[in-house]
Image (spheres, coloured by chain):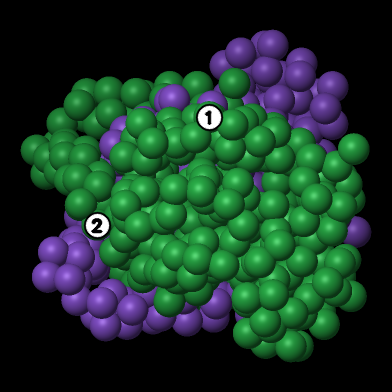
Chain colours: A green, B purple
Amino acid sequence: MALFNRVTIVGLGLIGGSLGMAARRKHLARVVIGVSRRPATLRRAKRLGAIDIGTTDFRRAVRDADLVVLATPVEDIAPLAERAAALMRPGSMLTDVGSTKAAIVNRLERTLPRGIAFVGGHPIAGSEQQGIEAADPHLFDGAVCVLTKTGRTKRAALLRVRRLWASLVDQVVIMNPRQHDRLLARTSHLPHLVACALIQATQVAPLPRAPRSFLDMTRIAKSPPELWREIVFSNRAELLAAMQRFDRQWRTLRACLTSQDRRGLQRMLARAQMKRNALDS
Amino acid sequence: MALFNRVTIVGLGLIGGSLGMAARRKHLARVVIGVSRRPATLRRAKRLGAIDIGTTDFRRAVRDADLVVLATPVEDIAPLAERAAALMRPGSMLTDVGSTKAAIVNRLERTLPRGIAFVGGHPIAGSEQQGIEAADPHLFDGAVCVLTKTGRTKRAALLRVRRLWASLVDQVVIMNPRQHDRLLARTSHLPHLVACALIQATQVAPLPRAPRSFLDMTRIAKSPPELWREIVFSNRAELLAAMQRFDRQWRTLRACLTSQDRRGLQRMLARAQMKRNALDS
């Protein structure tokens, strides 16, 4: 038996499209409905097997859904969740896939009607690409999905959304929104800004191409600027704190160089090596 | 006909071993001799097909070589080149694969005897791995190799070393040592320190694993600390200048965040995206 009867995905980009593909392949819903403002996106999503039914009619798409998944740019999630909740049947559920959680969860816990359960979600997968064309049913293979839990999270809804993601990713982790945002500031949003600063500081020519390591380190700078601007601002305080953590390490490294402290630099590089090696195991 | 009669590789690590394998496969030398202090390394190099003959006897190995390639850690290159040159026949050649060039080239142009031609070299290939076990005959496929040219570089030697590398890499680029060091400070040594600072600033747990982009961005922090300490110090001035270039971008990004300048951040991200996209073409 399918986990859900009707799942509606709002926003058919890289994540929404991939979720539709994966959910359909694994028969997690009897029917997957996709909503987009652009008919061309709906046609592509249908052709790629990401949805069973596509519509530009938001009201019709969410009205009878058991689960609505918001997979739009981060700044649109809360407003659309509120619009959806006003149309949905009591007892149905809302979740999202936004890259930051505190702003969204805090707001929706104040504004959503009682009958509609909301569970914040963030599958940590993706790439520098965007759009339905880049969608991939295997995008979530081996990934981690974070779901948020607060004093107001409804246990039954959390368990069902967890079952959905547990079928798609390697591991589902539950934490509070603030902890999520702090971890993502450090492991995702900080690296993003670092990659941007690095590419801007660098000039490759007259080398005919950049070293592979440089390309790997700057790949995420190819991500859509509009999406990332909003991710960054929706996690501003945690990101500024993460930047400060980086700065402390950076200053120490520089001090080793300016004061010709070979042993100090050796120590820094050795610690970094050890810490990085541990991430592989 | 082989390009060289006897090529001797001093140092059978990742680069020296890979060079031996590739040169033997392409029959660029009638015989490839490998020198290492450790007999176990020589045995492995022999078994992997990286050398025809292995010896721990430096004198015997370099005496009759047409070309000696120094593939040791960067701080050992100039002293070993001087030792080799004192033993080599007039008319023979020396080259190296060191990651920085100005210190080595400047010193050797003062100290080497007239009859021995030196050409600085740097195949921009490699990985975070080290040692003969990681050697790979295809390491240089598609890579760029920089050779240095100064007022004292002997044209005939440069052309022959260029022919060697042209058989192994995708493109050979000739520039002066200082230009090389500046470019590598920006595209390799700066990113290395950035990766180290990033991994040190970050904490992944309780996430069960780091996002793929984070792993890609910090992979080079796994490189051997001793090797990199010396690379960094041998290019200290250029690296400090590159760090300053990074700092300017970093401060601008932070200012966008602190002053809530969405348009400014958008501009920075869009420029970074454009610059990074250009590197793929």
According to the picture, the residue beneath numbered tag 2 turns out to be: A236
Q: Position of residue B111 (x, y in %)?
A: 33, 47
Label 2 sits on a secondary structure element that is helix
* x, y percent for residue B107: 31, 50
Type of amino acid at the residue the image marks with label 1: Arg
Horizontal arrangement in the rendering, residue B269 relative to residue A158 (left or right): left
The answer to whether residue B76 shows anywhere in this view is: no
Position of B166 relative to A68 (above/below): below
Confirm whether circles 1 and 2 share one chain.
yes
SS at mark 1 in the image: helix
Which of B225/A86 is in front?
Answer: A86
Is A95 situated above or below A131? above
Quarter location, residue B133: top right
Q: Give amino acid for label 2.
A: Arg
Task: Identify which residue is drawn at 52% across, 38% down.
Answer: A146
Viewer-closest of A144 and B269: A144
Q: Residue at x 56, y 35 (%)?
A: A158
